[in-house]
């Protein structure tokens, strides 16, 4: 929790006027800030896989990674191998974090039988890959 205090200068001392306790923004589940995305990955050896994923960042940041200035380090993203390209096919859902997570899980459960079960191709998100266009959106 973050505390915000409003103070007013009275002569040479401060008097606390109001204290508000606000939840940290990352703990609020009902912020419309998350998406479920659908992308196509094309690997250097010719294999094409599809991924259904969830993120509260941009899709590019989730896939490619980015430099986190606050933590002073680079995030890996999905950890795509050299020669792998991706194409954003669709944003399947946009809304609250909780609802986006539930939608992603529903889709994974629905298409569980079509999951890619070969060797690990990406560092993060490898259990969310599919051999075919399961959503039928890559036209």
Image (cartoon, rainbow, N blue to C red):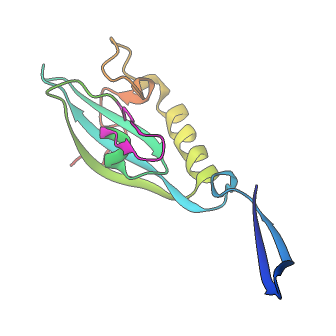
Which portion, as a residue range, is magenta?
64-78
Q: Is residue 43 above or below residue 4?
A: above
Q: Is residue 70 magenta?
A: yes
Residue 17: image location, x then y, percent: 86, 81
Examine the rendering and report whether any part of residue 131 can be seen. yes
Furthest residue to the front?
12
Residue 27 image position (x, y, % from top left): 69, 51
Q: Is residue 60 left or right of residue 24?
A: left
Percent across and percent down for residue 93 are 47, 55
Check the image and name the residue furthest to the bottom: 11
At x 32%, y 44%, the residue is 136
Prevalent SS, magenta region: loop
Residue 83 image point, x, y percent: 13, 27
At x 26%, y 38%, the residue is 40
> Can residue 135 be seen?
no
Judge left or right: residue 113 versus residue 99. left
Q: Quadrant of the N terminus?
A: bottom right
Q: Which residue is situated farthest in the top direction here?
A: 119
Q: Is residue 27 above or below residue 77?
A: below
**Of 138 and 69, the residue lying toward us:** 69
| Foreground pick, 93 / 84 | 84
Q: Residue at x 50, y 34 (%)?
A: 108
């Amino acid at each position: 929790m973050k505390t915000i205090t409003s103070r007013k200068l009275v002569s040479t001392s401060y008097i606390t006027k109001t204290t508000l306790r606000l939840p940290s923004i990352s703990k609020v589940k009902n912020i419309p800030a998350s998406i479920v995305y659908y992308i196509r990955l094309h690997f250097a050896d010719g294999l094409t896989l599809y991924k259904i994923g969830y993120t509260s960042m941009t899709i590019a940041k989730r896939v490619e990674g980015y430099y986190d200035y606050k933590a002073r380090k680079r995030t890996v993203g999905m950890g795509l191998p050299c020669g792998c390209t991706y194409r954003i096919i669709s944003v399947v859902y946009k809304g609250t974090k909780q609802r986006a997570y539930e939608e992603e899980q529903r889709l994974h459960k629905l298409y569980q039988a079509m999951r890619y079960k070969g060797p690990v191709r990406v560092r993060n998100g490898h259990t969310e890959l599919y051999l075919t266009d399961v959503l039928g959106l890559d036209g």
